[in-house]
Amino acid sequence: MIFAAGIGTRLKPLTDDRPKALIPLNGKPILEHVILKLKTAGFHHVVINIHHFGQQIIDFLAANDNFGLKIQISDEHDYLLDTGGGIKKAASFLQGDEPFLVHNVDIISNIDLRAFYDYHLEHHPLATLLVSKRETSRHLLFNEDLKLCGWRNRETGEVKSYYPDFDPRQYTEYAFGGVHVLSPGIFKWMEEWTGKFPIINFYLSICAKTNIMAYPVNDLTLFDVGKPDSLDEAEKWMQTK
């Protein structure tokens, strides 16, 4: 599943007349880069959620014959559901026997998606999160078994965890990379969650009861191209590859 429903506020005025997913990057829309990366990794069925200028995304996919893939649209034009709500709304497309990978449209990286997916299959947690030691103010906190246990905002000092007597100093900090693999059993855990909700809040609420794992990549190159500066940096990086 590709999250392409965001309004792209950080990229204004570029997103005043188009969705963030169709902002050009090194000669191609961001969405095309992500679709082709998934296709190269062996994914053949893709779900894309839409909201802001969603029809433009539908038209773009049609003009490119869906890049030879089976692509289905999860339409959030009435109400933007955030990451967790977006996954739950798309459940009818994603349920089945196989885990599914979720990828933010504004993440450009050198992650080997096939290796990542295979890691999830090998360890079979409920969800596996791409993480790294990237600089950020907000970190996910994992124990020595790479199991999610909490969250911390270094700037505000806020800590979230459902573990009693939680001491964030006892855990390893990682930054989430906006790519994760989820087992279809995730939807049973989501039954009581409705409407709009962030997937990270959901993960934190259940991590003490089930296994939400980290997939740490030491040599990860990752750009959040939802920001103008990162968009420029990603373009320079792609031109040197």
Image (spheres, grey):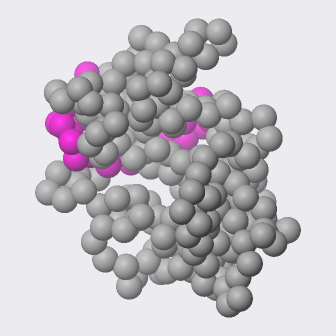
Residue 46's image quarter? Answer: top left
Relative placement, left or right, of 66 versus 218 is: left
Q: Is residue 152 above or below residue 138?
A: below
Image: 184 above or below 24 = below
The one of 101 and 156 positioned closer to us in this rendering: 156
Q: Is residue 214 left or right of residue 136?
A: right
For image coordinates 48% across by 18% down, the residue present is 232
* Image quadrant in which the C terminus is located: top right
Span highlighted in magenta in the image: 38-63
Residue at x 73% of width, y 46% of height: 133
Of the pair 174 and 127, the residue shown nearer to us: 174
- x%, y% of residue 236? 56, 13
Residue 139 in sight from this viewpoint:
yes
Res 98 visible = no
Residue situated furthest front in the rendering: 156
Residue 156: percent from left, percent from top: 54, 62
Q: Residue at x 59, y 66 (%)?
A: 157
Q: Indicate the quadrant where residue 48 lies.
A: top left
Q: Give coordinates of residue 89: x percent, y percent.
A: 32, 64
